Amino acid sequence: MNQSRDDRLEDDRLEDSLMRRFWARAAARTVKLRADLAVAVLDVVLVCSAFVAMLLLRFDGSVPADQWEPLLTFLPFAVIVFVLSNSAFGLYGQLWRHASLYEARRLVMSGSVATLILVMLELGPRHV
């Protein structure tokens, strides 16, 4: 009877230990996800700002009204392509305190691939 009680206590301790580890990992992933989400939101804002700035510069600050609609149609695709490209090249989920040439290379590759995809989408066949 005593052995059975000791076994249950040991099982309870093991279960508690597993639950603590599970919740610690879940909390760590949540913190990482929140940090990655913040960086992705910043990327969305920067991509949108860059395309709006390009349109403003193209027309010297006075953009014709008929030019805003194509931008607003194109912008969601551009944002998705840039965020997916950044994610594919591993730009999210790391600490950017000290960047090396390796990180700079990944950043350039991500931007180049995203730009190439957007150019291909823009120059591709159009169905009216």
Image (tube, rainbow, N blue to C red):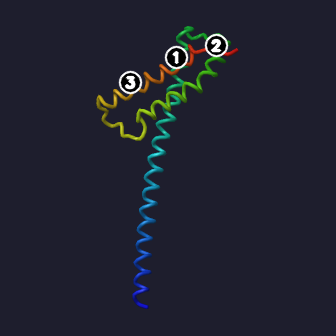
Mark 3: amino acid:
Val
Q: Nearer the viewer, residue 127 or 107?
A: 127
Residue sitting nearer the eye, 34 or 6: 6
Real-space Cα separation, disc 3 to disc 1, in angstroms: 16 Å
The mark nearer the N terminus, 2 or 3, is 2
Determine which residue is flagged by label 3. 108
Residue at mark 1: 119
The quarter of the picture where residue 113 lies is top left
Return the disc, 1 or 2, that comes first in the chain's sequence.
Answer: 2
The quadrant of the picture occupied by the N terminus is: bottom left
Tell me the residue at 46%/55% (across/down).
27
Query: Residue reaching furthest bottom?
Result: 1
Where residue 67 is drawn, which disc sits there? Answer: 2
> What SS does tag 1 mark?
helix
Query: Element under label 3?
Result: helix
Above or below residue 8? Residue 102 is above
* 102 left or right, relative to 120: left
Q: Quadrant of residue 62?
A: top right
Distance of label 1 from label 2 (alpha carbons): 18 Å
Give the x, y percent position of residue 114.
48, 24
Callout 3–callout 1 Cβ contact below 8 Å:
no
Compared with 97, 30 (above or below) is below
